[in-house]
Image: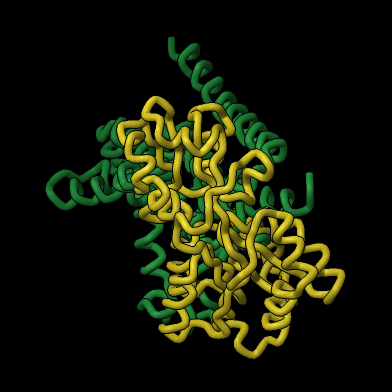
Chain colours: A yellow, B green
Amino acid sequence: MRSTWLLCLFITLAPLNGWAAESLRIAVAANFRVVLEQLAPAYQKATGNNLTLSSASTGVLYNQIRHGAPFDVLLAADSATPAALAEQGLGSSHRCYALGELVLVGGELDALADPGKSLAIANPATAPYGRAAEEVLQRPAFAAGHGRHLVRGNNAVQTWQFWHSGSVELALVPRSLAQEAGIPIPRGWYSPLQQDALILQRAANNPAAEGFLDWLQSPAIQAELGQAGYGRCP
Amino acid sequence: MSPAELDAIYLTLALAGTTTLILILLGTPLAWWLSRRSGNLPALVEALVAMPLILPPTVLGFYLLLMLAPDSAIGRLWQQLTGNQLAFSFSALVIGSVIYSLPFVVQPLQAAFTRVPASLLQAAATLGAPPLDQFRSIVLPLCRRSFLVAACLGFAHTVGEFGVILMIGGNIPGETRVVSVALYDYVESLQFAEAHRLAVGLVLFSLALLFLLYRGNGRVRAVAS
């Protein structure tokens, strides 16, 4: 009885091994997943290839790739992670695919100087958007707000959720999440949030990977990314 | 239900089923050994078994990631034996889940085995029953209910597992993307309607499983009194 059950299990699991063999496996940073999911049908139509998306924070993806995760392309939320992987010989064709933009939701810019307003930012230790938010808060004009109740989200999405659920009054989040609800932070107030791509070892001889990045950088798709809340690479 | 969700549900059930089967096979002799011995070594083993209850899943996941990677001893051995990479495969999830759910199976079994009177086993031994026969004819029938509890808890806990799987699975659709990870994906991508649907399913499933389990408890109590 037990062995029959095991046999059934093996038979049912066997097809899993060959699945999704022809599709391109993309490891994508959490903040870009929604946008890529919306663009994926257009890519499939244009090239006939499928995309399989796996998302996590850029740091988790870095650890997984270093330990043999079977991904073809990395779309990171920063430029340091792809650079580090390329240096270790784990990838090539390192390039920028989008520029993140920071916005404030919940009030005007001078609200950042008000210590009575609670504010959410992404964790500066792990999230690039958090580091950018910290740079903004360190401006002398906002020094008066330093005693405020400051909450740190695990990543940009969680930070946005803190605000969206009404738990905090203000939040510094990516424009791609806030859409028209946000007030843009001037570009010069924080270091550029360059999001870079890398073709990973597994796809070194797969022309589809290079093709995917070319498609992502094509004018039509870059225009769509602009609509979705990303700026153009320098 | 979208095909991606059905994939995730199927994967979750396959993972929990395989894990539970392995845990009962491994956990029974381990729990028996722990219930019949005392001293430093069994205490240490018991503490190790309980560790997954205390360690944060992401920490456990990180060490498992190092342990199962292609350049580790276990990863290399697996590659030589099967020809496939171990990390980020279904097999890796099974190994992780077995470790993570171990206390949920071993502890109820150990508690039940401890309550089996030694006199019964001695009586069976005097009648000439070898140890395996004693176990089958005395311990198994006495502890039937605890086996059910252990299996259900191991299964339910594996279904609800998240942090370890996110670290060692890599969130690959159709291979390592189980329901809890799919649910996390929905929340992260702000698809709250889909997230609610999966979450409600998970809650109802766990509630039903535990309800059926504990309803059985009541009956045993009623019979006993």
In the rendered view, tell whether residue A121 sits above or below residue A119: below
Quick one: which residue is furthest to the bottom in this view?
A205
Nearer to the camera, A194 or B10: A194
Q: Residue at x 44, y 49 (%)?
A: A133
Quick one: which residue is furthest to the top in this view?
B225
Q: Which corner quadrant of the image does residue B176 belong to?
A: bottom right
Nearer to the camera, A232 or B60: A232
Residue B129 appears in view:
no
Q: Which corner quadrant of the image does residue B207 belong to?
A: top right
Position of the C terminus of chain B by quadrant: top left
Count of marks, rendered view: 0
Position of the N terminus of chain B by quadrant: top right
Quick one: which residue is furthest to the front in this view?
A141
Q: Position of residue A173 (x, y in %)?
A: 53, 46
Q: Position of residue A87 (x, y in %)?
A: 42, 84
Quick one: which residue is furthest to the right in this view?
A45
Q: Position of residue B49 (x, y in %)?
A: 30, 48
